[in-house]
């Protein structure tokens, strides 16, 4: 049975780039992996999807046919995926891949927080093991209150989709190493995050910092992996974290030996 890797995150967080790099990483280590584009509105991709939802549903075509605007057409597109779900599942299964990477729509809130998105994922994944990767742009998370917001959104996404989850900080090549470490320290230390947030006067007036610390402690439930889609830094750690969740630390053996063992 294959392992599913669901790539989630807000627009601009690096979902398509990570999908591309992760598939290349797995294949380069002799692990059979395919990429599934589940965004019916995407214009271009940095990878060639093995399975492309746009062959079944295309948001631009729906805009032309219905006169809907971009958001309305995207909502209609995602709702229409369910009417093509059996064909989509059959095409994915035909590859018999060990790893299936699902690149989700750029407008995450339309996909994850409406009824259809979770239903689509549930229908595709079925009883197979799956892990979701929640991506956050580290340049956005550099501000303590923004980091706190990203962690809240990550938790909300987990509650909606209910898959084991890894938080992934992307674009770490854009910040000095010491700044990356500081952000990771705030994630791991709720007291430090709360005290950093308290330096922002508006929040200090509206929030009790003990509440921030308490919530931050709950939000630290997910492992956080920093990566760069440009340099490839962090992908060894990301792969190891994925394996711990979907395979209990054991590599998924194929007919070819895995050189990472």
Image: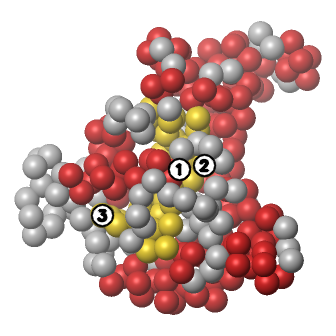
Q: Is 211 situated left or right of 189 in this image? A: right
Q: Which residue is mark 3?
A: 33
Is residue 10 at all visible to an observer of this figure?
A: yes
Give me the disc on residue 9.
Answer: 2
Q: Is residue 84 above or below residue 165?
A: below
Q: Which residue is mark 1?
A: 15
Q: Residue at point 49% right, 83% down?
A: 88
Q: Are marks 2 and 1 in contact (CB under 8 Å)?
A: yes
The colour mode here is secondary structure
Q: Are marks 1 and 3 in contact (CB under 8 Å)?
A: no
| Residue density around tag 3, few if under 14, some if 14–19, many if 20 or more, within 10 Å | many
Q: Earlier in the sequence, mark 2 or mark 1?
A: 2
- Across and down, in percent, residue 241 comes to 35, 44
Q: Is 191 situated left or right of 110 in this image? A: left
Q: Is residue 246 above or below residue 68?
A: above
Q: Is 150 situated left or right of 37 in this image? A: right
């Amino acid at each position: 049975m294959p392992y599913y890797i669901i790539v989630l995150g807000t627009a601009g967080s690096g979902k398509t780039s990570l999908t591309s790099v992760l598939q290349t990483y797995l294949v380069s280590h002799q692990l059979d992996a395919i990429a599934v584009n589940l965004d019916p509105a995407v214009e271009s991709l940095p990878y060639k999807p093995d399975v492309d939802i746009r062959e079944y549903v295309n948001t631009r075509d729906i805009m032309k046919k219905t006169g809907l605007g971009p958001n309305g057409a995207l909502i209609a597109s995602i709702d229409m995926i369910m009417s093509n779900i059996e064909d989509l599942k059959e095409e994915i299964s035909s590859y018999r891949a060990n790893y299936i990477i699902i690149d989700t729509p750029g407008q995450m809130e339309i996909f994850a927080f409406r009824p259809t998105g979770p239903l689509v994922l549930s229908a595709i994944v079925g009883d197979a093991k799956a892990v979701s990767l929640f991506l956050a742009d580290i340049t956005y998370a550099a501000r303590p209150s923004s980091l706190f917001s990203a962690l809240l959104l990550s938790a909300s996404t987990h509650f909606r989709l209910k898959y084991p989850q890894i938080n992934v900080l992307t674009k770490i090549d854009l910040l000095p190493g010491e700044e990356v470490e500081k952000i990771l320290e705030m994630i791991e230390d709720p007291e430090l995050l709360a005290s950093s947030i308290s330096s922002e006067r508006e929040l200090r007036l509206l929030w009790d910092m003990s509440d921030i610390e308490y919530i931050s402690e709950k939000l630290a439930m997910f492992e956080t992996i920093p990566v760069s889609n440009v340099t490839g830094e962090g992908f060894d750690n990301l792969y190891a974290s994925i394996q711990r969740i979907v395979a209990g630390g054991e590599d998924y053996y194929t007919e070819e030996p895995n050189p990472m063992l």
